[in-house]
Amino acid sequence: MSSFTVAQRLALKLYALKAKCQLTNRQYKMVTDLVEDVVNEYAPGFKCLSQYQSQRLVESIYPVKPTAHDMCPKGCFLFGDQTICPSCGGRRYKTNGTPARQMKVLPIGRYIQWR
Ligand SMILES: [Zn+2]
């Protein structure tokens, strides 16, 4: 953790707080704005990392990536080769070809290997 800048360490802590408290993007921005205001009293010009930068930082130090699985838009079925939900008839893809809904799963095996 010591090889990170103050802004990066703060970003990691704030991003963990965002996840733990399930803050919306707007709430997270309010927190980072508040932190910036306070820190700027002691270190003028200090800027918190943006949410995008914070997310990239977290991903760079955490090598296990979640895998995405297509699911029924209503959440009743996890698609394999199907494109129509056998339970409710929901479509797998939107008209633009992207999945209607996805569920992300952290592969526990790779997580254990990484730890
Ligand atoms: Zn369905």
Image (cartoon, helix red, strand yellow):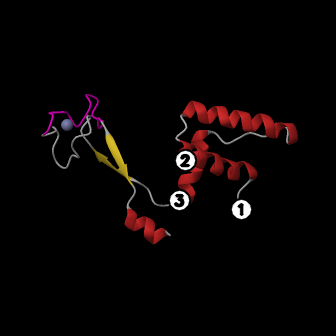
Q: What residue occupies the far front of the structure in this picture?
A: 21
**First in sequence: mark 3 or mark 2?**
2
Within 10 angstroms of label 1, few (less than 14), some, or many (20 or more) residues? few
In magenta, the rendered stretch is 87-100
Tally of marks: 3
Mark 2 CB lies closer than 8 A to ligand 1: no
Separation of disc 3 and disc 2 at Cα?
17 Å
Separation of disc 1 and disc 3 at Cα?
15 Å
Q: Which residue is mark 1?
A: 3
Q: Nearer the viewer, residue 17 or 55?
A: 17
Q: Residue at x 21, y 43 (%)?
A: 77
Give residue 84's quadrant in the image: top left
Secondary element under disc 3, as helix, strand or loop, is loop
Tell me the tag on residue 20.
2
Spot occupied by residue 19 in the image (x, y as percentages of width and height): 54, 46
Does residue 112 belong to the magenta stretch? Answer: no
Q: Residue at x 34, y 45 (%)?
A: 103
Q: Quadrant of ligand 1?
A: top left
Q: Which residue is mark 3?
A: 62
Amino acid type of the residue tagged 2 in the rendering: Lys
In the image, taking residue 115 as reference, residue 34 lies left or right, namely: right
Amino acid type of the residue tagged 1 in the rendering: Ser
Spot occupied by residue 90 in the image (x, y as percentages of width and height): 19, 33
Q: From this view, report whether residue 2 is shown above or below residue 16.
A: below
Secondary element under disc 2, as helix, strand or loop, is helix
Q: What residue occupies the far left of the structure in this picture?
A: 86
